[in-house]
Image: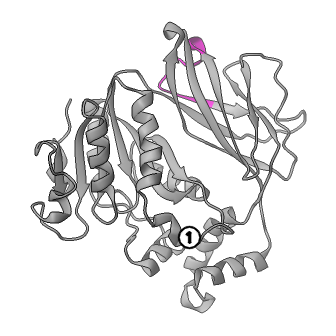
Amino acid sequence: MLSSSSPASELKKDEEIVFFPSLAQKVAKGAIWETEIHGWVYEPEQRSVALELFRKSLGVKREEVSDSENALFTERARAFMVDNERGKPISIRVGEKVHAVGKSEPNGHVSGRVRIPAEDLTSERVSFYAVLPAGDSRVFAGEIHRLDAAGLSVISDLDDTIKVSEVRDRKALLMNTFFRPFKPVDGMASIYQSWAKANGAKFHYVSASPWQLYPSLADFVLANDFPAGTFHLRPFRWKDETFFDLFKSPEKYKLSTIEPILKRFPGRRFVLIGDSGEKDPEIYATLARKFPKQVVRILIRDVTNEAAESDRYRLPFKGLPATLWSVFRDPKEVADAIPR
């Protein structure tokens, strides 16, 4: 894994790779950090005919959207129509060392565990770069986030928790996802920043949104001053399901995504924050019962106008300490809700 003679990534000039932020943890008595590098190898699709077919599959006619909405749709939709590249060996450089990651799968995604010496990971966020063939001057970069064994982590939902998505309204969800600029929930960024500064919180963004939206979501987090963090999104192919299927029955997906993080960092404390629009109360209550020493707070943004005393919350949180969970509408209500 640490060999400096690892081969270059076998990317052709018309192929690209996106790297997603990765978590690193200490192993081998602190001398080594281990991280799972995750990327996506693809060839961009430029045909306008494919874009039109994509739009029709969503049930939106060209005359129903403005020119600016159509331009945004074109930008976001292209990621769903790329040619995924399988069998591509990928290597990265961290500091002065090269590490082989592995070969891309049929869906274009590539992942592999890499061990990095402590001297090459000296800050909380470290950039790495794809090693490309000789003569290829392009730059494909990713970021590794160090996460100490102890500390505070915030696992945050995206849709209707920090980004206005209107998941319960199919038409609005579609427009907010593909045709409109992403809109932040007022006040959430400043609360998150205060937790990062005052509590030393690290952030992990978990969503049913597909990996194809990662570049747009990462830009949204950065542009709206949310703390940087790792992203944990959902695999998706149009041939397997419709876009709306992503937001059906999220329990299995979110549990299988969040549980490994809690198991990987048993010494950390976790705050789980989501909204009432889907199944976040049920999912987070399940995790609190399974990891009672790690889940220290559950915060639910109310988007369904139900009282905290209603069955909507009383039933999933039954038997859990009343001080563990809170329902809020104004982010200021939870400004001081998490432990230091």
Q: What stretch is highlighted in magenta?
A: 117-127
Indicate left or right for 22 with 284 as reference: right
The picture quadrant where one finds residue 120 is top right
**Would residue 74 be seen by someone viewing this image from the given angle?**
yes
Q: Where is residue 298 in the image (x, y as percent from the top left)?
A: 24, 46
Q: Which of 61 and 250 is in front in this view?
A: 250
Give SS at disc 1. Answer: helix
Q: Position of residue 295 (x, y in %)?
A: 27, 36
Q: Where is residue 162 in the image (x, y as percent from the top left)?
A: 35, 56
Q: Indicate whether residue 49 is drawn in magenta.
A: no
The picture quadrant where one finds residue 69 is bottom right
Q: Which amino acid does label 1 sit on?
A: Phe
Q: Residue furthest bottom?
A: 63
Query: Compared with residue 126, is residue 313 higher up or lower down, i.e. above or below?
Result: below
Residue position marked by numbered label 1 in the rendering: 243
> Residue visible at 31% across and 29% down?
200
